[in-house]
Amino acid sequence: MEVITQATAEQAVKLVSCLIEDRVKVKPDAVLGLATGRTMERVYAQLAMSAVSFKECTTFNLDEYIGLPSNDTQSYRHYMWEHFFSKVDIDIQNTFVPDGQATDLQQAATDFENAIDTAGGIDTQLLGIGVAGHIGFNEPLSSIMSRTRDKCLTPKTREQNAAMFGGDANKVPKRALTMGVGTILQARELILLATGSAKADIVARAVEGPITSMVSASSIQLHPNCKVIVDEEAAGCLQGREYYDFVFANEPEWERYR
């Protein structure tokens, strides 16, 4: 794992965008795992302004609320269309979001896993981190070996997402379909982006704390190719900051990004 701190949220977003652009330049038919959230909106805005073509790419989103129609303005399918898919040249047939409207959720989860396998697996998985330490909607006690499945959302997660529902946590769906922790860890590369002081404690627990199902994001410590990109505020509780900065300043692979 490598932890890279940028001075501002804007710089952190820019670095993540550049990393994704470079992956697509090298492999135009890259399979990308995508995330949602306010921070990711800025990533997608940067990617939409780039000269990179996503025409040959395939994408898989981490999760979707159960019970929301895909055209609901709060669904993640709608989010992706509004912030990314409609702004780039990607083939919409090659964009996959878990089917939260499925009558058979277990089958929908299996179909999603099969689609990832058919695509050859995910090359680069973009991740955010929730205040409860979740990646995707892998809430506390999610197994590190879990696969795509339906999950009940914690009150803390629903409160965090309430802003998208007019500030009313009671309007946030109680369940979601999500990639499992094991599914996420099978991606060939992970890039986790976190900004703001509200994420400082949980970032430190995920990166430097014990690997535990109570903080599903801590599982990224097991991945052989994981990059954590944070701004100064989100890096506020990291104990190994001096070493992380030294690595970024001296590793040849980061030279073009410094």
Image (tube, rainbow, N blue to C red):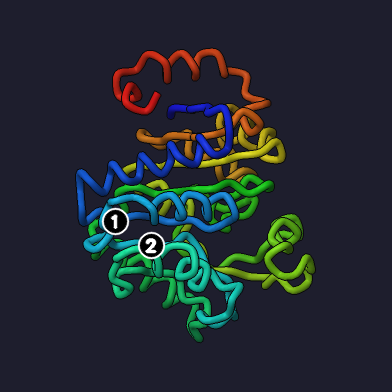
> Looking at the image, is mark 1 or mark 2 earlier in the sequence?
1
For image coordinates 78% across by 65% down, the residue present is: 167
Residue 18 x, y percent position in the rendering: 37, 40
Residue 106 x, y percent position in the rendering: 47, 75
For image coordinates 60% across by 49% down, the residue present is: 134
Residue 190 x, y percent position in the rendering: 40, 42
Residue behind mark 1: 31
Report crowding for label 2: few under 14, some 14 to 19, many 20 or more residues within 10 A (C-alpha).
Answer: many
For image coordinates 51% across by 35% down, the residue present is: 11
From this view, report whether residue 68 is shown above or below residue 163. Answer: below
Q: Which residue type carries mark 2?
A: Phe
From this view, report whether residue 247 is shown above or below residue 24. Answer: above
Q: For residue 117, what is the image quadrant?
A: bottom left
Of 67 and 90, which appears nearest the observer?
90
Of 38 and 240, which appears nearest the observer?
38
Q: Which residue type carries mark 1?
A: Val
Of 167 and 123, which appears nearest the observer?
167
Q: For residue 196, what is the image quadrant?
A: top right
Secondary structure of the residue carrying tag 2 is strand
Residue behind mark 2: 60
| Gap between marks 1 and 2 measured at Cα | 8 Å
From this view, report whether residue 172 is shown above or below residue 39. Answer: below
